Image (cartoon, coloured by chain):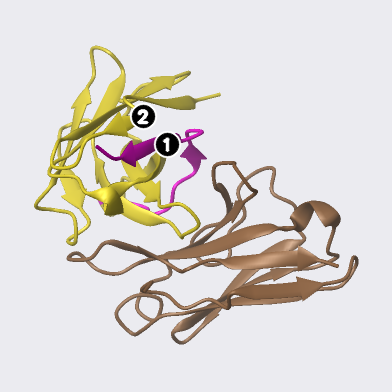
Amino acid sequence: QVQLQESGPGLVKPSETLSLTCTVSGGSVSSGSYYWSWIRQPPGKGLEWIGYIYYSGSTNYNPSLKSRVTISVDTSKNQFSLKLSSVTAADTAVYYCARVPYDFWSGSPLYYMDVWGKGTTVTVSS
Amino acid sequence: QSALTQPASVSGSPGQSITISCTGTSSDVGSYNLVSWYQQHPGKAPKLMIYEVSKRPSGVSNRFSGSKSGNTASLTISGLQAEDEADYYCCSYAGSSTFLVFGGGTKLTVL
Protein backbone atom coordinates (compact mmCIF):
# COMPACT_ATOMS: atom_id res chain seq x y z
CA GLN A 1 0.00 0.00 0.00
CA VAL A 2 1.79 3.11 -1.20
CA GLN A 3 1.86 6.08 1.16
CA LEU A 4 3.00 9.65 0.60
CA GLN A 5 4.24 12.01 3.31
CA GLU A 6 4.96 15.70 2.91
CA SER A 7 7.63 17.43 4.97
CA GLY A 8 9.21 20.85 5.20
CA PRO A 9 9.13 24.17 7.06
CA GLY A 10 5.72 25.30 8.23
CA LEU A 11 6.69 28.97 8.14
CA VAL A 12 8.37 30.82 5.28
CA LYS A 13 9.18 34.53 5.07
CA PRO A 14 7.84 36.67 2.21
CA SER A 15 10.14 36.79 -0.84
CA GLU A 16 11.91 33.58 0.22
CA THR A 17 11.68 30.12 -1.32
CA LEU A 18 9.26 27.49 -0.08
CA SER A 19 10.76 23.99 -0.14
CA LEU A 20 8.83 20.78 0.47
CA THR A 21 9.62 17.10 0.07
CA CYS A 22 7.30 14.16 -0.49
CA THR A 23 8.58 10.77 0.66
CA VAL A 24 7.06 7.72 -1.01
CA SER A 25 6.79 4.48 0.95
CA GLY A 26 5.41 1.13 -0.17
CA GLY A 27 6.23 2.01 -3.76
CA SER A 28 8.92 3.58 -5.92
CA VAL A 29 9.14 7.00 -7.56
CA SER A 30 11.18 5.19 -10.22
CA SER A 31 8.13 3.19 -11.23
CA GLY A 32 7.35 4.15 -14.78
CA SER A 33 3.67 3.61 -14.00
CA TYR A 34 3.16 6.97 -12.29
CA TYR A 35 3.73 10.69 -12.36
CA TRP A 36 4.12 12.54 -9.05
CA SER A 37 2.23 15.75 -8.39
CA TRP A 38 1.85 18.72 -6.04
CA ILE A 39 -1.50 20.37 -5.28
CA ARG A 40 -2.28 23.14 -2.81
CA GLN A 41 -5.32 24.48 -0.97
CA PRO A 42 -5.40 27.99 0.55
CA PRO A 43 -7.30 28.28 3.83
CA GLY A 44 -11.04 27.96 3.23
CA LYS A 45 -10.58 27.73 -0.52
CA GLY A 46 -10.46 25.14 -3.29
CA LEU A 47 -7.73 22.98 -4.75
CA GLU A 48 -5.07 24.23 -7.17
CA TRP A 49 -2.82 21.96 -9.23
CA ILE A 50 0.82 23.06 -9.08
CA GLY A 51 2.59 20.57 -11.33
CA TYR A 52 3.93 17.05 -11.73
CA ILE A 53 7.08 15.12 -12.56
CA TYR A 54 7.96 11.73 -14.07
CA TYR A 55 10.86 9.66 -12.75
CA SER A 56 12.83 10.67 -15.85
CA GLY A 57 12.64 14.29 -14.74
CA SER A 58 10.03 15.35 -17.26
CA THR A 59 7.80 18.06 -15.73
CA ASN A 60 4.70 20.12 -16.42
CA TYR A 61 3.57 23.10 -14.38
CA ASN A 62 0.48 25.25 -13.83
CA PRO A 63 1.01 28.19 -16.20
CA SER A 64 0.05 30.65 -13.45
CA LEU A 65 2.90 29.39 -11.22
CA LYS A 66 5.40 28.22 -13.83
CA SER A 67 7.83 31.11 -13.44
CA ARG A 68 8.27 30.36 -9.71
CA VAL A 69 7.96 26.56 -9.48
CA THR A 70 10.51 23.78 -9.71
CA ILE A 71 9.63 20.13 -9.10
CA SER A 72 12.44 17.59 -8.91
CA VAL A 73 12.82 13.90 -8.15
CA ASP A 74 15.46 12.02 -6.15
CA THR A 75 15.16 8.35 -6.99
CA SER A 76 17.93 7.37 -4.54
CA LYS A 77 15.85 8.71 -1.64
CA ASN A 78 12.48 7.74 -3.15
CA GLN A 79 11.38 11.37 -2.88
CA PHE A 80 10.20 14.23 -5.02
CA SER A 81 10.32 17.89 -4.09
CA LEU A 82 8.70 21.27 -4.65
CA LYS A 83 10.37 24.66 -4.67
CA LEU A 84 8.29 27.82 -4.97
CA SER A 85 10.24 31.05 -5.11
CA SER A 86 9.39 34.64 -4.21
CA VAL A 87 6.50 33.62 -1.98
CA THR A 88 3.83 36.00 -0.71
CA ALA A 89 0.94 35.63 1.71
CA ALA A 90 -1.12 34.32 -1.21
CA ASP A 91 1.04 31.18 -1.18
CA THR A 92 -0.15 30.29 2.32
CA ALA A 93 -1.87 26.94 1.93
CA VAL A 94 -1.99 23.25 2.72
CA TYR A 95 0.32 21.56 0.25
CA TYR A 96 -0.42 18.00 -0.86
CA CYS A 97 1.66 15.55 -2.83
CA ALA A 98 -0.13 12.92 -4.88
CA ARG A 99 0.34 10.09 -7.37
CA VAL A 100 -0.88 10.28 -10.97
CA PRO A 101 -1.22 7.06 -12.99
CA TYR A 102 0.59 6.91 -16.33
CA ASP A 103 -0.94 5.59 -19.53
CA PHE A 104 1.66 3.62 -21.47
CA TRP A 105 -0.57 3.50 -24.53
CA SER A 106 -0.77 7.29 -24.93
CA GLY A 107 2.55 8.05 -23.29
CA SER A 108 0.84 10.58 -21.03
CA PRO A 109 -0.34 10.86 -17.44
CA LEU A 110 -3.99 9.99 -16.86
CA TYR A 111 -4.62 13.35 -15.18
CA TYR A 112 -6.19 12.18 -11.94
CA MET A 113 -4.65 11.76 -8.49
CA ASP A 114 -5.29 8.33 -7.00
CA VAL A 115 -3.18 8.48 -3.82
CA TRP A 116 -2.66 11.61 -1.71
CA GLY A 117 -0.45 12.55 1.18
CA LYS A 118 -2.04 13.97 4.32
CA GLY A 119 -0.88 17.47 3.49
CA THR A 120 1.35 19.99 5.21
CA THR A 121 0.47 23.55 6.16
CA VAL A 122 2.78 26.31 4.99
CA THR A 123 2.30 29.86 6.23
CA VAL A 124 4.03 32.78 4.56
CA SER A 125 4.63 35.49 7.14
CA SER A 126 7.42 37.65 8.48
CA GLN B 1 -12.20 32.29 -9.62
CA SER B 2 -12.00 28.61 -10.51
CA ALA B 3 -11.81 27.33 -14.04
CA LEU B 4 -14.70 24.89 -13.51
CA THR B 5 -18.01 26.01 -11.99
CA GLN B 6 -19.69 24.03 -9.22
CA PRO B 7 -22.62 24.97 -6.99
CA ALA B 8 -21.40 26.20 -3.63
CA SER B 9 -23.67 23.86 -1.73
CA VAL B 10 -26.17 21.05 -2.12
CA SER B 11 -28.16 19.16 0.46
CA GLY B 12 -30.26 16.05 0.76
CA SER B 13 -31.84 13.76 3.29
CA PRO B 14 -30.55 10.29 4.11
CA GLY B 15 -31.56 7.80 1.46
CA GLN B 16 -32.13 10.44 -1.20
CA SER B 17 -30.04 11.08 -4.30
CA ILE B 18 -28.22 14.28 -5.15
CA THR B 19 -26.31 15.47 -8.19
CA ILE B 20 -23.42 17.94 -8.24
CA SER B 21 -22.70 19.67 -11.52
CA CYS B 22 -19.34 20.80 -12.85
CA THR B 23 -19.48 23.18 -15.78
CA GLY B 24 -16.45 23.88 -17.92
CA THR B 25 -15.87 24.77 -21.54
CA SER B 26 -15.11 23.13 -24.86
CA SER B 27 -11.43 23.49 -23.92
CA ASP B 28 -11.62 21.23 -20.90
CA VAL B 29 -14.66 19.17 -19.84
CA GLY B 30 -16.17 19.26 -23.30
CA SER B 31 -13.07 18.02 -25.10
CA TYR B 32 -11.72 15.25 -22.90
CA ASN B 33 -13.10 12.29 -20.98
CA LEU B 34 -10.62 13.11 -18.23
CA VAL B 35 -12.90 14.41 -15.48
CA SER B 36 -12.30 13.25 -11.93
CA TRP B 37 -14.10 13.84 -8.63
CA TYR B 38 -12.67 14.09 -5.13
CA GLN B 39 -14.29 13.91 -1.70
CA GLN B 40 -12.74 15.91 1.13
CA HIS B 41 -13.77 15.71 4.76
CA PRO B 42 -12.78 18.61 7.04
CA GLY B 43 -9.08 18.60 7.85
CA LYS B 44 -8.43 15.59 5.62
CA ALA B 45 -6.80 15.02 2.27
CA PRO B 46 -8.97 14.67 -0.82
CA LYS B 47 -9.99 11.15 -1.85
CA LEU B 48 -10.49 10.04 -5.44
CA MET B 49 -14.12 8.99 -6.03
CA ILE B 50 -14.49 9.00 -9.82
CA TYR B 51 -11.97 9.14 -12.68
CA GLU B 52 -12.26 9.34 -16.46
CA VAL B 53 -15.81 10.71 -16.10
CA SER B 54 -17.50 7.57 -14.79
CA LYS B 55 -14.99 5.02 -13.49
CA ARG B 56 -14.89 4.13 -9.82
CA PRO B 57 -11.66 3.20 -8.04
CA SER B 58 -11.61 -0.04 -6.14
CA GLY B 59 -13.19 0.43 -2.72
CA VAL B 60 -15.44 3.34 -3.63
CA SER B 61 -19.12 2.64 -3.07
CA ASN B 62 -21.27 2.07 -6.15
CA ARG B 63 -23.58 4.73 -4.72
CA PHE B 64 -21.21 7.19 -6.40
CA SER B 65 -21.50 7.62 -10.17
CA GLY B 66 -20.27 10.10 -12.74
CA SER B 67 -21.42 11.27 -16.15
CA LYS B 68 -20.84 14.01 -18.69
CA SER B 69 -22.92 15.87 -21.24
CA GLY B 70 -21.28 18.50 -23.38
CA ASN B 71 -19.31 20.90 -21.21
CA THR B 72 -20.91 19.73 -17.95
CA ALA B 73 -19.88 16.78 -15.82
CA SER B 74 -21.97 15.46 -12.95
CA LEU B 75 -21.45 13.46 -9.79
CA THR B 76 -24.48 11.60 -8.45
CA ILE B 77 -24.65 10.13 -4.98
CA SER B 78 -27.54 7.78 -4.36
CA GLY B 79 -28.80 6.50 -1.02
CA LEU B 80 -27.26 9.44 0.84
CA GLN B 81 -25.58 8.59 4.11
CA ALA B 82 -24.37 10.84 6.91
CA GLU B 83 -20.77 9.94 6.08
CA ASP B 84 -21.18 11.44 2.60
CA GLU B 85 -21.29 14.93 4.12
CA ALA B 86 -18.11 16.54 2.77
CA ASP B 87 -16.74 18.89 0.15
CA TYR B 88 -16.59 17.59 -3.42
CA TYR B 89 -14.27 18.85 -6.13
CA CYS B 90 -14.30 18.16 -9.85
CA CYS B 91 -11.14 18.27 -11.93
CA SER B 92 -10.54 18.15 -15.67
CA TYR B 93 -7.66 17.96 -18.11
CA ALA B 94 -7.60 21.22 -20.05
CA GLY B 95 -5.08 20.63 -22.81
CA SER B 96 -1.31 20.73 -23.10
CA SER B 97 -0.94 24.36 -22.04
CA THR B 98 -3.14 24.48 -18.95
CA PHE B 99 -3.09 20.78 -18.02
CA LEU B 100 -5.31 20.40 -14.93
CA VAL B 101 -8.09 22.63 -13.59
CA PHE B 102 -10.32 22.22 -10.54
CA GLY B 103 -13.80 23.36 -9.69
CA GLY B 104 -14.38 25.62 -6.70
CA GLY B 105 -15.88 22.81 -4.66
CA THR B 106 -19.37 21.94 -3.43
CA LYS B 107 -20.32 21.46 0.19
CA LEU B 108 -22.71 18.56 0.60
CA THR B 109 -24.92 18.64 3.67
CA VAL B 110 -26.85 15.56 4.69
CA LEU B 111 -29.90 16.84 6.51
Q: Which residues are magenta?
A: A107-126
Q: Quadrant of the N terminus of chain A?
A: top right
Q: Position of residue B39 (x, y in %)?
A: 61, 54
- Residue at 30% over, 22% down: A79
Image coords of residue A122 (percent x, y): 36, 37
- The residue closer to the viewer here, A67 or A74, is A67
Q: Amino acid at mark 2?
A: Gly
**Chain drawn brown, letter?**
B
- In which quarter of the view is residue A90 placed? bottom left
What crowding class fits label 2: few (fewer than 14 Cα within 10 Å), some (14-19), or many (20 or more)? some
At numbered mark 2, what does the secondary structure look like: helix, strand or loop?
Answer: loop
Give the residue drawn at x 9%, y 52%: A67
Q: Is residue B44 left or right of residue A106?
A: right
Regarding residue A108, the answer to whether it shows in the image is no
Q: Amino acid at mark 1?
A: Thr
Q: Residue at x 41, y 39 (%)?
A: A98
Q: Is B92 left or right of A91, judged from the image as shown? A: right
Residue B34 position (above or below residue A24): below
The residue labelled by disc 2 is A10
Judged from this view, the residue extending furthest toward the front is A126
| Left or right position of A2 against A76 | right
Q: Are marks 2 and 1 in contact (CB under 8 Å)?
A: yes
Residue A125: say if magenta.
Answer: yes
Q: What is the letter of the yellow chain? A: A
Asked if residue A59 is among those painted magenta in the image, a careful observer would answer no
Identify residue for label 1: A121
Q: Where's residue A126, x and y in %?
A: 24, 37
Q: Quadrant of residue B92?
A: bottom left
